[in-house]
Image (cartoon, grey):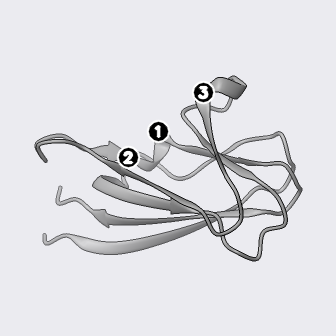
Amino acid sequence: MRASFEIINKAVTTAGTPVVFGTDQHRFTSCLFRAPSTNTDKVYVQKSSTAQTVERIPLEPGESIPFTVPGGSDFLDLSQFYADAAVNGERVVGFYVKARK
């Protein structure tokens, strides 16, 4: 199976209630999370549904943050990332190259 470019669009229905990006079936070695410029306030990328304020990365509308696994022998998966927002309905978009199984 060859690698494929994937996009996941995650909306946070209720601000303050993080949503998981996906499952462990979505494996990758690098990704980019972006806050669409149409958002009206900050969104957050975090490592769990209960992350403390210092354990999340804030993104203003139009900002992005990349993640890369060094060396390429290991991978991350979408179940390791959560999105939250300051305003109901805001979105975070993830771009990644799906790793081979």
Task: Pick whichever, 38 or 14, lies toward us.
Answer: 38
Which mark is in front, 1 or 3? 3
Task: Pick whichever, 24 or 66, lies toward us.
Answer: 66
Would you say 19 lies left or right of 73 here?
A: right
State yes or no: discs 3 and 2 in contact (Cβ < 8 Å): no
Which residue is at a point 84% across and 49% down the rendered structure image?
86
* Residue matched to label 2: 77
Q: Residues within 10 Å of mark 1 (few under 14, many from 20)?
A: some
Q: Amino acid at mark 2?
A: Asp
Q: Amino acid at mark 3?
A: Glu
Image coords of residue 43 (percent x, y):
72, 52
Would you say 20 lies left or right of 31 here?
A: right
Q: Amino acid at mark 1?
A: Gln
Image coords of residue 88 (percent x, y):
89, 57
Residue 91 visible (yes or no): yes
Q: Quadrant of residue 50?
A: top right
Which residue is at a point 22% across and 59% down the rendered structure image?
99
* Residue matched to label 1: 80
CA distance separating discs 1 and 3 = 13 Å
* Residue matched to label 3: 55
Q: Quadrant of residue 101?
A: bottom left
Which mark is in front, 3 or 2? 3
Q: Earlier in the sequence, mark 3 or mark 2?
A: 3
Image coords of residue 69 (percent x, y):
24, 43
Above or below residue 39? Residue 54 is above
State yes or no: discs 1 and 2 in contact (Cβ < 8 Å): yes
Q: Residues within 10 Å of mark 2 (few under 14, many from 20)?
A: many
> SS at mark 1?
helix
